[in-house]
Image (cartoon, rainbow, N blue to C red):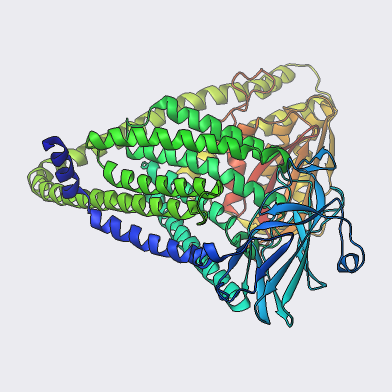
Amino acid sequence: MKKLKAILNFYIRNIPIFTIGTLVLIMLFITGLYYMQFVNYNRDMVPKAVRGVFDFSDPDIESDKCIPLKGKVEFYWKEFLTPEDFKENSPEPLYLKIPGNWNGKLVNGEKLGANGYATFHFKIVVGKPGSYGIKIKEFESAFNLWINGQDYGGAGEVGTSKKEMTPSWRRKDYHVCVTQDTVDVILHISNYHHRLGGASELIYFGPSETVREAKSLRSGVETFLLGILLILILYHYTLYHYRRKDKSILYFGLMCLAILFRLSTTGEKLLLALFPFISWGIAIRIEYISMPFIGMMMVAFFHKMLPGCIPNWFRKTIYALALGLSAIILFLPASIFTYTSYIVAGLTFLLVVGLFIFLLKALIRKHNNALGIFLGFILLFLVMINDVLFYLSVIETSYLLPFGLIILLLTQAFIISRNTSLAYAQVEKLSKELEEHTEKLEETVENRTRELKEQAETLDQANQRLRELDTFKKEMTRMMVHDLKNPLGNIVGLIQLPELGRDNRELIIYSGNEMQNLIQNILDVTKFEETELKLYRGKALLYDLADAAYQQNKYNLTLNSIQFENKISRDFIIDADKELIIRVFINIISNATRHLKYEKRIRISADMIEKNKKKYYKVSVFNSGELIPEDRLEAIFDVYHQIYDKPDEFKYSSGIGLTFCKMAVEAHGGEIAAFNEEGKGVTFWFTLPV
C-alpha cells in the first residue's frame, strides 16, 4: 500500500493530471454529441420489418428521431426490378435481414458469394404525411435508390458485371415529401469489388429536418476533429524542423497524419467531399492502410518516449506486419485486400495487449511520461472495446476509434509540449549560467589571449604563404620543363639541319608560338592571382579572332589530320581584349588536339543569348575527343588540374591553359564551362557580353 501511494505521489508532483483530464472530458463530450442523434431513441418501441414492411404508424413511436431500419425485407437475387415490375406480378420474393450481407445465403440451393447484384424492396408506413429523409451510411461497391416510384440515384453505377458497374463511397441523404401513409423503397445493389455484398450498413429513417441536423452535426464534429489533427500535424512538424534529434516528435506527427486520413475516409467521408475526384479504389486503400500505419507509428512514438520499455522484438514484429499489410493493400485488388480486416484485428489485439503490458511496467518503474501515456492508452483501449462490441451488434453506439485516437493524441501532445517546455526552460537556465561564467572568464582571459591570437594568425599566414610559394615553385618548374621540352626540342633539332624546308619553318614557328603562349599564360595567371587582369578593349569580329587562333594552330591541325570548322557569324562584333580572346581560342583548341582519338574534328560556333536582361555571345568549341569524367568537369579550370590521375606522355600538360581561359573570360564579365555529349565528344563554351 505504501509503495502504491509513493508511486501516485511521484506522478502527482510531476504531471498535471487535471489538465489531461479536462482535455479528455471535452473530447468525451464531443464524442457523445457525435452519435447521440443515432442512439437517442427508445429501442423497445422501434418495430422491425415484417415481410418487408416497417410500421411506424403507432403514435407511441418517437416520430421525431432518426430510427434505424432493421428486419427482413424482400430480396430478389440477380434482378434489377423497377417500380413498374412491382405494379404487375412481381417474382416471388425471398427475405433477407438488413443490415446484413448476402454472403453465405442460400438462394435456390446456391450458396452466395460476395459478387453479384440484387434488388431490395420494403415499405415504410408512417403515422402522418410530411417530409422524410433516408440516410444510408454506406454500402460497399454501388447502389441505386427508388422512392415512391422516383429514381433518386445513388452511389456509383450498378451493373450486372464487373465491367458494367462502378463502385463509389459518395455520401448523400435522400428526402421525399410523403402525401400518403406509405413510403415505397426499391434498392439496387451490385458488388464485384469488395469481400462483402449487400446492405451491410444501417439505413436510418426520420423527419427530413432531423436527418439534416444529424448530418450537419456529424460533419461539423468531424471537421472540427480534422482541424485539430491538422493543427497538431503542422505544429509538430514545425517543432521537429527545429529539433531534429527528437524523433518522437516526427513519429507523433506521422501518427496524426495517419489518423487524419483514417477519420476523413470513415464516418461522413469528408475526404471524398473535399476531393470528389478521388476514386473508390484510392479511398478504400487510404482507409485500410491507415490502421497498420497508425499502429506502426504508435509503437515508434512510444519507443522514443519511453526508451528501453518497448522490446526490439515486439517493435520489429509490428513493423514487419504493418509493412506486409500495407504492401498487400497497395498492390492487390480490393476484393482480396479487404480480407486483411481480420489480420488488422489480430494485429490490433497484439498491439493493444503488448503495449498495455509494456506501459504498465513503465508506470511501475516510475518512468517519465509513463502516467500520461498510460491514461491516454487506457481510454483508447475502452474505445476499442466499444468498437468491437458495436461491430458484433452487442451494443448500438457508433465507431469511436477516431475519437479514442484523438484523445490519445491530445494526452501525448500535452506530454510532448511539457517536455519541450521543460527542455527550453533548462536550456535557458544553463544558458544564463554559462553566460555569467563566460563573462567572468572573458575578463580574465581576453587580455592574455589577444597577443597570442595575433601572433598565431601572423605565423599561420606566413607559414601558409611559404607553403604556397614552395608548392607553386615546384609545380611551376615541373610543368614548365615538361611543356617547354617538346617545342624547344623541335626548334633545336630543326636548326641543326643544313637546309630548312617550308614544313620545318612552320614547325619552328608553331613551336615558338606554343612556348610563347605557355609563358604568357603563366605570367597572366600569376599576375591575375595578385591583381586584376587589365583589359585593352577594342572592336573586333568574333569570327576573325577564332580564325587567328586557327592560323596559329594550323600546322598542328594539318599535321594530325584534324578537321576544323569555323561557323561563327561574320556579323558578331565584340568589344574585348582581342589578344586575350585569341589566346582563349588557342588554349581551348590546343587542349582539344591532345584528346582527339578517333574521328578528329573541331567545330567552333556562336549564338546570341539573353541572361538577366543582358545579351551575350555564347561561343561553343566542340571536339570529337574523349569524354571528361563527370566529377572533373568543373575542376578542369583550376590551376594545374589534370583530368587523368596518371596521364600518358602525349596528353600530359601543365593544365594552366584552361585556368587562363577562365580568368580571361570572367574578366570580360562572362562565364566558361564544359559538358560531355555521350557518343559524340566534348563541348567547351564561354560567354562574352555583346
How many numbered marks are there? 0
- In the image, residue 457 lies at what x, y percent? 26, 39
Q: Is residue 138 above or below residue 354?
A: below
Q: Is residue 682 left or right of residue 307?
A: right
Q: Residue 489 lies in what quarter of the image?
A: top right
Q: Is residue 648 above or below residue 124?
A: above
Where, quadrant-wise, is the N terminus in this rendering? Answer: top left
Observer able to see residue 127 = yes
Q: Is residue 132 above or below residue 676?
A: below
Q: Residue furthest right?
A: 88
Residue found 86% across the figure and 58% down from its top: 80
Which residue is more in the foreground, 226 or 381? 381
Which residue is more in the foreground, 556 or 182? 182
Which residue is more in the foreground, 508 or 588? 588
Observer able to see residue 531 = no
Q: Is residue 171 left or right of residue 456?
A: right
Residue found 61% across the figure and 72% down from its top: 206
- In the image, residue 231 lies at what x, y percent? 44, 60
Q: Is residue 629 above or below residue 684?
A: above
Q: Is residue 340 left or right of residue 182?
A: left
Where, quadrant-wise, is the C terminus in this rendering? Answer: bottom right
Q: Residue 479 lies in what quarter of the image?
A: top right
- In the image, residue 53 lies at what x, y percent? 72, 64
- In the image, residue 271 lies at what x, y percent? 61, 60
Q: Residue 555 lies in what quarter of the image?
A: top right
Which residue is more in the foreground, 313 or 587? 313
